[in-house]
Amino acid sequence: MGAALKKRLLELGGVREFERGEVLLEENAYIRSLPLVISGSIRVMRTDDEGREILLYYIQAGESCIMSFLGGLHRDRSRIRAVVDEAAEVLIVPSEHISSLVREQPEWLDYIFRLYQKRFEELLDAVNAVAFKRMDERLSDFLRRRSEVVKSKTLEITHEQIAQELGTARVVVSRLLKEMEHKNLLKLGRGKIELV
C-alpha cells in the first residue's frame, strides 16, 4: 500500500487498540466500518444455529476483512464474527468512505481485489479441509497456521477453543493432541501447546 493511500486512510479513519478476546464484529450486526489491521491479528469465524463456530481465516498486519468491505459497501449485516486473536492496533475506516475511496484511489481497488483473492483461496482451503481431510490433518494444519500467525511455537489456547474453531468436540481434540504428544510432535501444558 502506497504512502498516499495510507495517508488518506488515516485522514478518514481512526486508530484503536484492542485486547485479545475483544469482539470487533458480531454476526447479524450492521457493518459500519472497515478494519485495517496495523499490528496483531483477528480471527474470522462463522457460527451455526447451534452456536458452533468454525474458523474461516485470520486477518493480520496490513490486511483487512473482505466481508466487512462488501457488507459496508452495501450497508448489509455481518455474516461473520471477528474476534481479536492477538492484541491489535486497528485503523477503523467508516463504511461511508469505501465507495469514494474506490473512485479517488485506484490503488485501493487493487488492494481490495488482491485481498479478495487471498480470502477466497483461504475459504477454499477451509472447505477442502472440512470435506476431504481427516480431523488429525485439520488439527495439525490449524496448529501450524496458528503458530505462523502468532509467530511463536508456544500457543496459548485451550482444547475447547481449538474444538470450537475446528467445529468438532473437545474430547476429539484432546485425544488427537495426546496422540501427537506421544509422537513427540508437541508438548501439552495447562492452557498452552508447545510445538516441537
Image (spheres, grey):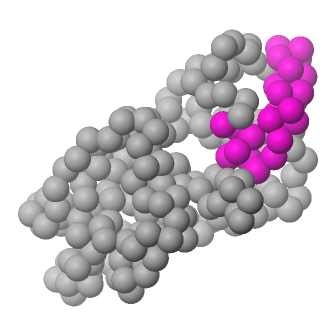
**Percent position (x, y) of residue 65?**
43, 63
Residue at 52% across, 58% down: 81
Q: Quadrant of the C terminus?
A: top right
- Main secondary-structure element of the magenta-colored stretch: helix
The single residue placed furthest to the front in the displayed view is 50
Residue at 88% across, 58% down: 132
Q: 131 above or below 172?
A: below
Q: Is residue 129 left or right of residue 59?
A: right
Q: 143 above or below 179?
A: below
168 magenta-colored? yes
Query: To which quarter of the image does residue 106 belong?
Result: bottom left
Residue at 20% across, 84% down: 100
The one of 84 and 102 positioned closer to us in this rendering: 84
Count of numbered badges drawn on the protein: 0
**Percent position (x, y) of residue 75?**
37, 83
**Percent position (x, y) of residue 149?**
52, 38
Residue at 59% across, 20% down: 154
172 magenta-colored? yes
Give the magenta-colored segment's residue range: 161-184
Q: 46 above or below 146?
A: below
Query: To which quarter of the image does residue 73 belong?
Result: bottom left
**Percent position (x, y) of residue 194?**
66, 17
The one of 171 and 120 positioned closer to us in this rendering: 171
